[in-house]
Structures are given as structure tokens and as C-alpha cells.
Amino acid sequence: MNKWISLLAGCLVSVAAYADGIEDLRHFYSNTHAMRARFEQTVFDQKGRKLQAVAGTMLLSRPNKFRWDYNKPYEQQIISDGQQVFLFDIDLQQVTVRALEQVLGTSPAALLAGGPAVESGFMLTRLQSQGGLQRIQARPKQKDSGFQVVIISFRDRQLAEMRMVDSFGQSTYIVFSEVEVNPTLTPNQFLFKAPKGVDMIAE
């Protein structure tokens, strides 16, 4: 899967003082059944040097359907139809196919496409609010998940940012904009049809 999200900061504080972050997460699970947004994604190496910047659009439909379309110069698609996840690298003309349970169990995608049961796979901690954002830190309970930590931030109960550090110390930062909550989406928007001549790799 494409690597997501940026170096984190913020000290842990008392649960009582920052309860809104967890409440925002619960509100997101309970009330956001579908979502459409634009995003800007920046990837950094272990020393904080920018490696990649790309923008695109994303769709979300529970349960477990999502679509991320990355624009130039790094054109990719990540699409879940609710059963399988397809990663299409347009430059390489290659599609990697994974079973949904391989991706959702302890991945950042689980934090968006899943639901309240996600707490069984992640240790959630409230973080100090920053710049008007209510923040939650999520650490996977499974050691070989491929990443160390994810921070999800909400503004006025809407998803605003995600930050992630992977197991190699590379970090990714995603900022969401033009967020639409519960738009009308169709099943066809989450179907992947491989173009002719594309290599398919099952994992």
C-alpha cells in the first residue's frame, strides 16, 4: 500500500482534559457513513526531508469501501470494493490485489473505513489539542503492522488530518479539504476494472 502520513509531536496529557478527541472519533464512526474529500499528501524520510508531494481525491463508504485517486506526478489508485483491495500503479501498469482482511486488520485504512470495533486492533490515546484540532494517537497492537503510529485530527468534528510513521521511520502527512459528509455514492465508484495489458499480482 502507498505509504501515508508525517512526524508526530505533542505530549500526552490527562484523559479528562482532552476527552473531545475520542468523542470526535466516536462521532465520526456513528455519523459519517460516507465521505468525499480532496487531500494533499506529503512524504518525508527519517531526517524530515521531503520525498514526495501529491494530491488527489478520496471516497469512503462503510462498511469497508474506500477509494483514493492520486494525481500526477505519482498517479495511483487504491480501491476497496468491500472484499478486496486493489493498488494500481499507473506508471508501472501493475495492480497488486490483497484480501480486505489483510489490509483492514491493523492498517490506517481501518481507522477510517472500520468502526468502533477498531479499538480492538489499536491502542488509542488522547493527545493535547493543537491549532484547534482534536487529536487521537493510534498504535497498532499487532507488531508487524508495518507502521508505528497514526495520529488522526478533527476540526469541528470533521476529519481534518492524518499523520503516520511507518516501521522504517518514514512519515506521511495528509490534509483533507472540501470534506462532504454522507454524500450519495454508488457501488460502481468502488469497483476496480483493470485496463487491458496490466499485470495483476495477488498477495
Image: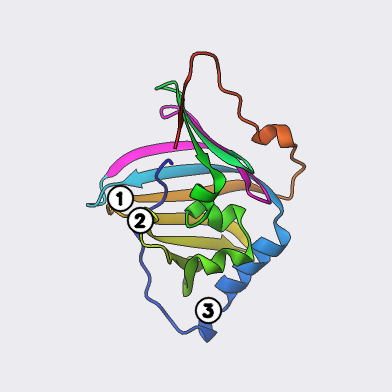
Residue 73 counted in the magenta span: yes
Image coordinates for residue 46, horizontal then vertical, percent = 24, 52
The residue that appears at 74% across and 45% down in the rendered structure is 183
The residue that appears at 71% across and 64% down in the rendered structure is 30
Whole-number angstrom distance, CA of label 1 to CA of label 2: 6 Å
Q: Which residue is mark 3?
A: 18
> In this view, which residue lies farthest toward the top?
197
Q: Are marks 1 and 2 in contact (CB under 8 Å)?
A: yes
Image coordinates for residue 115, horizontal then vertical, percent = 63, 61
Up-down: is 77 above or below 161?
Answer: above
Find residue 186 and report its image quarter: top right
- Residue 148 can be seen, yes or no: yes
- Residue 68 can be seen, yes or no: no
Q: Is label 2 in a helix, a strand or a loop?
A: strand
Up-down: is 85 above or below 169?
Answer: above
Q: Which residue is mark 2?
A: 165
Q: Which quadrant is the N terminus positioned in?
A: top left
- Seen from the viewer's position, the closer of residues 28 and 11 is 28
Amino acid residing under circle 1: Gln
- Residue 86 - label: none
Amino acid residing under circle 3: Tyr
Question: In the rendered structure, which segment of residues is drawn in magenta?
Answer: 50-79
Dot placed on the residue nearer the N-terminal end, 1 or 3? 3
Whole-number angstrom distance, CA of label 1 to CA of label 3: 28 Å
